[in-house]
Image: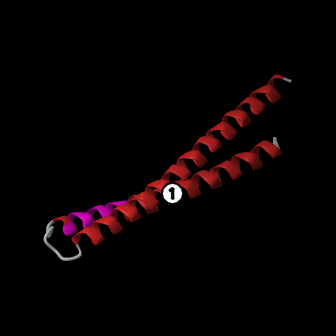
Amino acid sequence: MKDFMAEILKINKKAELINKTVSFFQEKIEKEIASCEETEKNPNSFDFKKRMNEHRFRMILMLNKLGEEEKNLNELEKSTDKLRKNINNSHKE
């Protein structure tokens, strides 16, 4: 049972890190959207296209990072399911 508890704590720490990372990027994305909206208000600016491309680039980077976190979360769910099965099997024995 001690091993199961250690695994539960490990999974919990990973889940906390994923949640913090997602919250961090959610905030960054919201700021980037606001910044992009400000840029869109002045389409005649001499550097409008450059600034819009920079916004797109930063958004793509952040969305890619969130995609990685989604993969990490899926792996964590698999680990949790495996642990749950192991715990259930140990109780049957």
In the rendering, at what x and y percent does residue 3 appear? 82, 45
Question: Which residue matches tag 1?
Answer: 65
In the rendering, at what x and y percent does residue 2 appear? 82, 45
Q: Where the N terminus falls, by quadrant?
A: top right
Horizontal side of residue 44 vs 5, given as left or right: left
Looking at the rendering, which quadrant does residue 26 occupy? bottom left
Q: How crowded is mark 1: few (under 14 residues within 10 Å), some or many (20 or more)?
A: some
How many numbered circles does the render carry? 1
* Residue at 20% over, 68% down: 38
Horizontal side of residue 81 vs 71, given as left or right: right
Horizontal side of residue 12 vs 37, given as left or right: right
Q: Where the C terminus falls, by quadrant?
A: top right
Which residue is more in the foreground, 73 or 39? 39
Q: Give the range drawn in magenta.
A: 29-39
In the rendering, at what x and y percent does residue 16 appear? 57, 55
Instruction: Inspect the magenta stretch and tell me whether residue 92 lies in it.
Output: no
